[in-house]
Image (cartoon, helix red, strand yellow):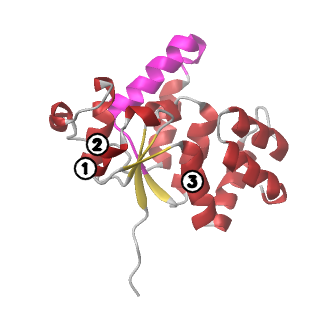
Amino acid sequence: MAGSAPLTAVLDANVLYPTLVRDLLLSLAQIGLYHARWTTDIENEWVRNLLADRPELASRLPDVVRLMREAAPDCLVENHRPLIDAIQLPDPGDRHVVAAAIAGHADAIVTFNLKHFPAETMALHGIEVLHPDDFVMYQLQLQPYAALEAIKGMRARWKNPPRSAEELISALEKRGLTMAAAHLGEVRGLI
């Protein structure tokens, strides 16, 4: 019987910046629900922005980056830079993300900035742009038990401080993942 490859998604810097969203997306990738990809440019962008806001984290971020790469093997897209100049977007600063998606053979880009990636432009490259809430909901709908197990495992890793299911649901809602929060609220006993 033939199998199917998991979806490949490039994670934009703005979904890697918030710890909770990053942890959730990588927890789903780590168990093989999808193939998470990004570039060193994307990595540097979220790290640089986080350090600007939270300089006290400087000594911890190299370990975070290392753990991210371990959680998502083959995550780094290379050879995307030659494609950047050929891509037209409202914000030229986002062209490298589309170039990464093309070079990385991605099906989707996961970002909070949907307006930065017009559907017409993305359709030319066969790439869908998804808000992280939609993306997480797709994972919860396509493979509900595996996705819930990944979320449960993520919550179990949180020791300092630990979070209850209710706290996780509330935090997801505050981060703009309202559909995922509502869904998890219905199955809170499983996470």
The answer to if 31 sits in the magenta stretch is no
- Which span of residues is magenta-colored? 36-59
Query: In terms of secondary structure, where does tag 3 sit?
Result: helix
User: What is the quadrant of residue 190 in the picture?
Assistant: bottom right
In the image, is residue 168 above or below residue 14? below
Q: Quadrant of residue 88?
A: top left
Task: Say whether marks 1 and 2 touch (CB < 8 Å).
Answer: yes
Residue at image location 20% in from the left, 33% down from the top: 84
Question: Do labels 3 and 1 touch, CB within 8 Å?
Answer: no
Determine the residue positioned at 71% across, 32% down: 174
User: Is residue 116 shown above or below 165?
Assistant: above
Return the residue at label 3: 28
Q: Residues within 10 Å of mark 3 (few under 14, many from 20)?
A: many
Q: Residue 40 in magenta?
A: yes
Q: Amino acid at mark 1?
A: Leu
Q: Residue 19 is drawn in which quadrant? A: top right
Residue type at mark 3: give it: Leu
Residue 83 position in % (x across, y down): 17, 38
Q: CA distance from mark 1 to mark 2?
A: 5 Å
In this image, 127 relative to 67: left or right? left
Depth order, front residue of 63/113: 113
Q: Disc 3 to disc 1, how far (Cα)?
A: 28 Å
